[in-house]
Image (cartoon, rainbow, N blue to C red):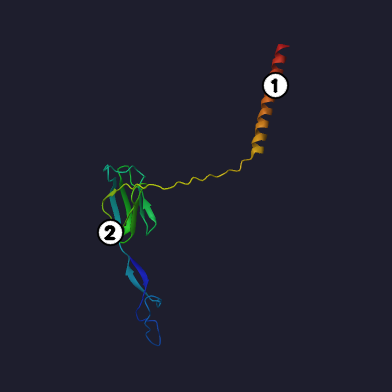
Amino acid sequence: MEANLPIYGLACPMAKAEQIEFDTHTKNCGCMIKAKKSPMLLLQGIITDSKTKAPFEAGLVNVYNVTKGTGTLPDANGMYELQASYNDEIRVSFVGYKTISLPASQLPKAIELQEQSEKLDEIVITGKRKNRHYALVGFGLTALLLMYAIAEDEKGNKKKLIQK
């Protein structure tokens, strides 16, 4: 796998009059060189709870490649698989447990998540007031009552006709 990368800090072969040195922090000459991309790794492993040593249930833990923006969830046995480059940052997280962030090359096969308990000083509960259309509700109830009254009236008329 190859990629085109800009040449930084080298004499530009494109300069006509003289070879100009470019500062590596500010410019590049626009020339490109071929560089090999890092190979992809298939990361596989198991995620367990550090206290119980049991694997997490399917879909609870998030295994996320921060560099590429991809992720996966472990299966019912706590096993996961994820494609990543050698230096990609991998983040393993679950609510109530410490988040682990490591380069893909340093991620162990067996990951034990440790419980993280924090005490909250304050809890703020906010409410949202919904706009209710009371007039529409009133009209709806009135219509239902009217329909009920008409139905009852029709029942009464049928009984009178049958009795005659």
Q: Is residue 21 above or below residue 142?
A: below
For marks 2 and 1 on the same chain, the one whose residue lies earlier in the sequence: 2
Foreground of the two, 134 or 142? 134
Residue under label 2, please give it.
105
**Secondary structure state at the residue bearing disc 1:** helix
Cβ atoms under marks 2 and 1 closer than 8 Å: no
- Label 2 and label 1: CA atoms lie apart by 81 Å
Mark 1 closeness class: few <14, some 14–19, many ≥20 residues within 10 Å: few
Pick whichever, 161 or 66, lies toward us: 66
Q: Residue at (65%, 30%) from the top-left corner?
A: 144
Disc 2 or disc 1, which is closer to the eye? 2
For disc 1, the marked residue is 154
Residue 96's mark? none
Q: Amino acid at mark 2?
A: Ser
**In the image, residue 146 above or below residue 82:** above
Give the residue at the far bottom of this rendering.
Answer: 17
x 36%, y 53%: residue: 64
Q: Identify the image quadrant of residue 102.
A: bottom left
Image x and y of residue 84, in percent:
33, 57
Name the spot of residue 43 as percent of width and height, x first. 29, 54
Image quadrant holding the C terminus, namely: top right
Q: Which kind of residue does numbered mark 1 sit on?
A: Glu
The front one of 139 and 30 is 139
Query: Residue placed farthest to the front in the image?
Result: 121
**Residue 158 vs residue 36: left or right?**
right
Across and down, in percent, residue 105 comes to 28, 59
**At which x and y percent is residue 150?**
70, 25
